[in-house]
Image (spheres, rainbow, N blue to C red):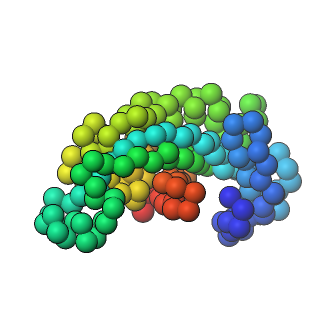
Amino acid sequence: MEGEVPPTGTKRERGSWGGAGLVTRTWPGDHGHGGPECRARLSRLVSFSASHRLQSKSLSEEENLKLYGKCNNPNVHRHNYKVVVTVYGEIDPDTGMVMNLTDLKKYMEEAIMEPLEHKNLDLDVAYFADTVSTTENVAVFIWENPQKLLPEGALYKVKVYETDNNLVVYKGE
């Protein structure tokens, strides 16, 4: 979360790792810490392993090979994906939390781990039957799944690392 600019009209406090999630707090206007309008972003990381083959049904075999190269291998290839899900909301004055991390962990288990862990994305996940399993589309799939479980408007962004060097950030746009 380093380097991100907070929304206009907010102040930013340095993020800190607290157990399983990263919390970045923002305060609208000049309200002090713990004020009634405190909002924060809460992030949790999960990792899963999955295989896939980049192959578009709308392209010929030659076009697929030219476009996707070694990622078009008919024998598939595997990644150890890392996913960071960030929720945003008001800090509850009674609990001190945007969301209980135990609940977020449960939502991510159901929405990400169960459908994707140790799966061939193209064969085992219905979403990818007609959608190319690029990291961009994996991010969209992951965005759509927790939406069904999380409180409305809570999901802020999904960050999917295919490798240490390749990642996609998706905010539902």
Q: Nearer the viewer, residue 130 or 24?
A: 130
Q: Nearer the viewer, residue 23 or 69?
A: 69
Quarter of the figure with the C terminus: bottom left
Q: How many marks?
A: 0
Could you tell me if residue 26 is visible in this image?
yes
Residue 17 position by quadrant: top right
Determine the residue positioned at 75% across, 36% down. 19
Determine the residue positioned at 77% across, 53% down. 15
Q: Position of residue 129 (x, y in %)?
A: 21, 46
Using residue 64 as the reference point, say whether residue 116 is left or right of it.
right
Q: Position of residue 111 (x, y in %)?
A: 43, 35
Residue 95 position by quadrant: top right
Using residue 26 as the reference point, say whether residue 65 is left or right of it.
left
| Looking at the image, residue 95 lies above or below residue 40 | above
Q: Nearer the viewer, residue 171 or 141?
A: 141
Using residue 159 as the reference point, say whether residue 119 is left or right of it.
left
Quarter of the figure with the N terminus: bottom right
Q: Nearer the viewer, residue 54 or 102?
A: 54
Q: Position of residue 13 (x, y in %)?
A: 81, 57
Determine the residue positioned at 43% across, 35% down. 117
Residue 21 position by quadrant: top right
Q: Position of residue 26 (x, y in %)?
A: 74, 56
Could you tell me if residue 127 is visible in this image?
no
Determine the residue positioned at 57% across, 32% down. 105
